[in-house]
C-alpha cells in the first residue's frame, strides 16, 4: 500500500494527474504528454525502480469510454510490495507514446508486446518489431475489432503430404 | 520331401514382409515434438512409473534423421507449423505420426486466431490420442495400436510407398516456381471465399488415404 | 512461411565477418520448450544472442475475453503447465479482488497448500532440467519421482493429474477428502528424504558446481532494472517476496523464511530453489496441521458460487442462485473497474490485470508472465560465456513456453 505522502507528492508535482483508488490500489491517470515525466519522477524520486508490467486495454466497446486505448504502466518498489498504476490514453490514428526503455531495460520486450498486440508505437524504442506473431502478420489481434478466430491466417499454411518426404 | 512338421523346433517360416514389420514395430524411435503441456505427460510416459521401454519405444532421439515416429504433443500454432513440417520432411520413410492430445488433433480449447485447428490439415497423421492431456496409459495404448497398424501394412522394400497415389499439395499448386519449398503464399483473409471454405468442408481429404 | 531471419544473421560488417551464426531451436532438446535463439559465436564464445519467441503464442488473452470468470480457469492451467495450481490460485485471487469477495479460512488454507505443492513441483522440474542439461541424469530421475507423488495428491483433490482447474470464484471445486490429506501427510514424511538425496547428489558435485558457478551472473541493480522477480531476483540479493511483503491468502499465519543468495549466478539460483522447497514443506506442514474446518466457499447469498445440488433441488434460494449464475445474460456481479493482483508464483510475480465491464466476461484480462520478463534477460546473461553454458543459463531461468508466449 502506497503511503499518502507519496500520493500527495505526485499530485503536487503534476496537478493534471487524476488519482483514484479502488481496493486499496492507487491509480494515477495522466495525459500522454507527461507520462514519461511522471514515470521518471516515480523512478528517480519516489523509489519505484521496478517496472512490473506495461500493458494496454482497448476501450472500443467499453461502456462510457472516451478514448480508445489505455496504456497501463505498473511500477513497484523492489524492497516491498508497494505498487502504483500509471495510466494514459491514446487514440487512433497512429497511437504513439514515448518509450520508457531509457528508464528501464526491462521495458523493451513489454513495449514490443504492446506494439504487437495493439499496434501502439513507442517512439525511440530501438527495436520495435513484432515479438509473438510472425513478422508478416497483418493485424493487431488484441484489438477489439479483430475476431477471436482470426481472419483465416491460421489456415494459410502449405500442406505436406505423404509422398513429399 | 520335407514336411512342415519335420522342421526343427526353432525354425519359423514366415513372410519376409511380416518379419520386417515385426522388427519395425518393436523398435520405434520416437521424435518428441513436445510443445506444450502434453509434453509433460510425454515425459512422464518416458519416466520410470509408466516406462515406455516396455514397448520398445524408449529411444527418444532429437534428430529427425534418426527417428521413425513423430509424437506431436501439444498445440501447434501457425508460427510453429512450418518448423513441424520441415522436421517431418527430414524424417526417413517408413515414418509414422501420433497426434497426442486434443490440441494437436483438433485445436482443443484454443479456437483462436493463432492455433492450427488440427495438425492433420497440414501433415499426415496415423494415430490420434484424445484427452487434455491424455494420461500416459492412453499414449501407450496409441503406441500399441500403431504397432498393430505397422504389422498390417508396409513391405520390406517399401513398394507400398512407391504405390501411393501422387497428391499434389493444395497450397503449393499456386506457386509453380518452387513446388517443394516451404513458403507461404500471399496471405489469405477471411473476405476471401476460399479461406472460409477451408474451415468447414474438406476435412475428409486425409493426406494418406 | 519461412523462418524469420534475424538481423543478426544478416550482419555484413567486415568486423563481424569471422563470427558464426548458430540457430538454436525452436525444437531442440535443451530448450525443453519451444523457443529459438540465434547465437553469434566467436569460436566457442557467445558474442551476442537474439531471442525469437512466439512459437507457442495461442491467444490466451483474447480467449479470456470470451470465457467467463469460472471458465477461464481451465485456460490458466495451460499457462504455466508445470505448476498449474499456482495459476489457478492467482487467477481467482484477482477475480475475487475485483468482485470484493473474501474466501473462508479453510479455502485459504487449502489454496496455500496447493500453491506450495505447485511450487515444489515447479522447482523440482527446473532443478532437474538444470541437472539434466549439465549431465546429471540420475538427478533428473530422483527429482521426477516426488513429482508423481504430487500428481497423486492433485488427483485425489480434484481428479486430474495436472490440468486441475481446482479453484472457483469464491471457493474451490471440492473440499479436500481425508484421503487427500493423508496423501499430503505421507508426502511431507517422504519429501525431506528425497530432498536430502538430491542435495547429496548434486549440491557439491564437482562437475555441476564448475558448470554453474559464476555462469550467467545477474547483479542486484540489473535485476531491479530489468524487472526480475521471484527466485531469480532473490538469487541476486533482492529480498522481495510477495508472500511476506503483501501476505495474501493466509500466508501471514505461517512461519517461513524468504530464501536469498548473493551470487546471482546459476548455482545461486539452484540453491535458492532447493531452499525454497524446504520452506514450502514447512508451510504445507503448518497448514495441514492447522487446517480450519468449515465451508470451502463463500456464502451462497453472495451470488458467486454455484450451490450444491441438494440446495438447488430443495431450496428456492439455491435454485435461483444456480439459475442466476448459469444463465448467459446474468452471472456474476462485477463492478466496472480495473484491478491488478499479483501472487508469488514459483517463477516470480504472476499478476493479472483485469478490467471488468459489468458482465460475467472479463473485458480484458492481462497476465503478467514472469517467464516473459525473465527470458528478456537471456542475451544479457549469456554474453561472453561459452556455447556449453547456454543450456545451464536457460535451465536456471526456468522458461515455460506457454507462459512466455501465452
Ligand atoms: S491437449 Fe490439453 S494438455 Fe495437451 S497441449 Fe492441449 S491444452 Fe495442453
Image (cartoon, helix red, strand yellow):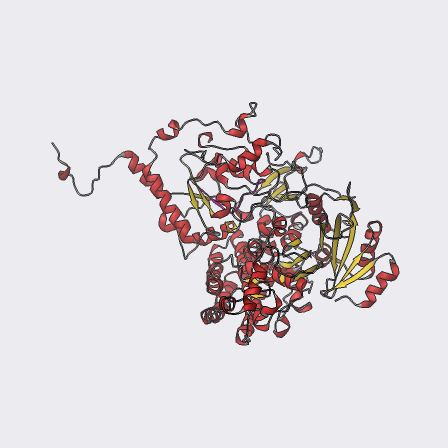
Name the main secondary structure of what is drawn in magenta.
loop
Q: Quadrant of residue A25?
A: bottom right
Q: Residue furthest left?
A: B1
Left or right, A38 with reference to B161: right
Residue C153 lies, in percent from the top left, at 48, 65
- Examine the rendered structure and indicate whether residue A11 appears above or below residue A99: below
The magenta-colored residue range is B70-79
In this view of the protein, which residue sits in the foreground, B30 or B194? Answer: B194
Residue at image location 70% in from the left, 32% down from the top: C12
In this view of the protein, which residue sits in the foreground, C156 or B28? Answer: C156
Tell me if residue C204 can be seen.
Answer: no
Residue A36 lies, in percent from the top left, at 82, 51
Q: Residue furthest front?
A: C316
Left or right, B28 with reference to C197: left
Residue at image location 57% in from the left, 64% down from the top: C320
Left or right, C14 with reference to B94: right
Q: Quadrant of the N terminus of chain C?
A: top right
Q: Residue furthest top?
A: B177
Q: Quadrant of residue B149?
A: top left
Residue at image location 50% in from the left, 58% down from the top: C162
Tell me if residue A126 can be seen.
Answer: yes
For the image, the number of numbered tags is 0
Find out whether residue C20 is within the magenta segment. no
Residue B189 lies, in percent from the top left, at 62, 34
In this view of the protein, which residue sits in the foreground, C264 or A42? Answer: A42
Residue C396 lies, in percent from the top left, at 59, 55
Amino acid at each position: 500500500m502506497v503511503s499518502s505522502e507519496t500520493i500527495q507528492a505526485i499530485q503536487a508535482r503534476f496537478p493534471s494527474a487524476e488519482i483514484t483508488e479502488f481496493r486499496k490500489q492507487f491509480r494515477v491517470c495522466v495525459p500522454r504528454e507527461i507520462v514519461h515525466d511522471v514515470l521518471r519522477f516515480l523512478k528517480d524520486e519516489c523509489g519505484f525502480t521496478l517496472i512490473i508490467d506495461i500493458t494496454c486495454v482497448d476501450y472500443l466497446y467499453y461502456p462510457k469510454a472516451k478514448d480508445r486505448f489505455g496504456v497501463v504502466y505498473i511500477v513497484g518498489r523492489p524492497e516491498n510490495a508497494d505498487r502504483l498504476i500509471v495510466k494514459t490514453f491514446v487514440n487512433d490514428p497512429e497511437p504513439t507514446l514515448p518509450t520508457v526503455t531509457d528508464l528501464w531495460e526491462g521495458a523493451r520486450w513489454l513495449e514490443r508486446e504492446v506494439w504487437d498486440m495493439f499496434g501502439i508505437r513507442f517512439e525511440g524504442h530501438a527495436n520495435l518489431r513484432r515479438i509473438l506473431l510472425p513478422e508478416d502478420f497483418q493485424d493487431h489481434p488484441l484489438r477489439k475489432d479483430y475476431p477471436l478466430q482470426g481472419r483465416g491466417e491460421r489456415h494459410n499454411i502449405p500442406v505436406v503430404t505423404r509422398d513429399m518426404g | 520331401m520335407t514336411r512342415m512338421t519335420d522342421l526343427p523346433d526353432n525354425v519359423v517360416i514366415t513372410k519376409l514382409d511380416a518379419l520386417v514389420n515385426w522388427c519395425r514395430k518393436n523398435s520405434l524411435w520416437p521424435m518428441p515434438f513436445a510443445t506444450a503441456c502434453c509434453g509433460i505427460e510425454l515425459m512422464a510416459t518416458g519416466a520410470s512409473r509408466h516406462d515406455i521401454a516396455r514397448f520398445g519405444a524408449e529411444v527418444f532421439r532429437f534428430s529427425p534423421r534418426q527417428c521413425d515416429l513423430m509424437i506431436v504433443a501439444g498445440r501447434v500454432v501457425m508460427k510453429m507449423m512450418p518448423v513441424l513440417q520441415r522436421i517431418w520432411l527430414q524424417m526417413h520413410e517408413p515414418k509414422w505420426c501420433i497426434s497426442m492430445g486434443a490440441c494437436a488433433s483438433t485445436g482443443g480449447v484454443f479456437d483462436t486466431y493463432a492455433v492450427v485447428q488440427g495438425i492433420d490439415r497440414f501433415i499426415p497423421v496415423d494415430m490420434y490420442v484424445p484427452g487434455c492431456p491424455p494420461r500416459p496409459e492412453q499414449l501407450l495404448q496409441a503406441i500399441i495400436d500403431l504397432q498393430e497398424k505397422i504389422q498390417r501394412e508396409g513391405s520390406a522394400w517399401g513398394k507400398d510407398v512407391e504405390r501411393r497415389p501422387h497428391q499434389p499439395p493444395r497450397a503449393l499448386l499456386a506457386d509453380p516456381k518452387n513446388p517443394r519449398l516451404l513458403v507461404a503464399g500471399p496471405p489469405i483473409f477471411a473476405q476471401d471465399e476460399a479461406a472460409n471454405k477451408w474451415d468447414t468442408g474438406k476435412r475428409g481429404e486425409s493426406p494418406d488415404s | 512461411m519461412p523462418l524469420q531471419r534475424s538481423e543478426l544473421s544478416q550482419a555484413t560488417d567486415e568486423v563481424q565477418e569471422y563470427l558464426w551464426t548458430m540457430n538454436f531451436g525452436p525444437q531442440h532438446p535443451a530448450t525443453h520448450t519451444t523457443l529459438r535463439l540465434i547465437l553469434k559465436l566467436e569460436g566457442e564464445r557467445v558474442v551476442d544472442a537474439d531471442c525469437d519467441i512466439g512459437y507457442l503464442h495461442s491467444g490466451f488473452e483474447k480467449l479470456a475475453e470470451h470465457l467467463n470468470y469460472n471458465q477461464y480457469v481451465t485456460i490458466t492451467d495451460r499457462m504455466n503447465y508445470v505448476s498449474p495450481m499456482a495459476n489457478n490460485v492467482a487467477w481467482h485471487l484477482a477475480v475475487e479482488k475485483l468482485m470484493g469477495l473474501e474466501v473462508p479460512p479453510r479455502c485459504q488454507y487449502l489454496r496455500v497448500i496447493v500453491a506450495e505443492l505447485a511450487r515444489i513441483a515447479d522447482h523440482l522440474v527446473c532443478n532437474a532440467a538444470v541437472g539434466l542439461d549439465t549431465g546429471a541424469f540420475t538427478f533428473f530421475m530422483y527429482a521426477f519421482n516426488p513429482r508423481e507423488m504430487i500428481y497423486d495428491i492433485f488427483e485425489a483433490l480434484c481428479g486430474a493429474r495436472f490440468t486441475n482447474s481446482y479453484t472457483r470464484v469464491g471457493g474451490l471445486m471440492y473440499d479436500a477428502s481425508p484421503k487427500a490429506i493423508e496423501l499430503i501427510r505421507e508426502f511431507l514424511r517422504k519429501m525431506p528424504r528425497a530432498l536430502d538425496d538430491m542435495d547429496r547428489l548434486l549440491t557439491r558435485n564437482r562437475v555441476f558446481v564448475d558448470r554453474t558457478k559464476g555462469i550467467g551472473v545477474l547483479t542486484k541493480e540489473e535485476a531491479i532494472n530489468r524487472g526480475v522477480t521471484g527466485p531469480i531476483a532473490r538469487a541476486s540479493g533482492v529480498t522481495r517476496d510477495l508472500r511476506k511483503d503483501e501476505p495474501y491468502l493466509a500466508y501471514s499465519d505461517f512461519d517461513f523464511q524468504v530464501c536469498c543468495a548473493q551470487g546471482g549466478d546459476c548455482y545461486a539460483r539452484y540453491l535458492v530453489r532447493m531452499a525454497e522447497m524446504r520452506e514450502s514443506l514447512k508451510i504445507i506442514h503448518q497448514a495441514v496441521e492447522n487446517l480450519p474446518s468449515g465451508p470451502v466457499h463463500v456464502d451462497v447469498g453472495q451470488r458467486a458460487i454455484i450451490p450444491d445440488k441438494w440446495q438447488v433441488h430443495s431450496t428456492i434460494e439455491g435454485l435461483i442462485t444456480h439459475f442466476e449464475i448459469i444463465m448467459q445474460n446474468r452471472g456474476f456481479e462485477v463492478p466496472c473497474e480495473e484491478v491488478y493482483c499479483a501472487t508469488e508464483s514459483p517463477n516470480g510475480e504472476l499478476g493479472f490485470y483485469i478490467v471488468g465491464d459489468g458482465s460475467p466476461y472479463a473485458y480484458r484480462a492481462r497476465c503478467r508472465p514472469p517467464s516473459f520478463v525473465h527470458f528478456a534477460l537471456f542475451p544479457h546473461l549469456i554474453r561472453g560465456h561459452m556455447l556449453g553454458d547456454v543450456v545451464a543459463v536457460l535451465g536456471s531461468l526456468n522458461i515455460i513456453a506457454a507462459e512466455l508466449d501465452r
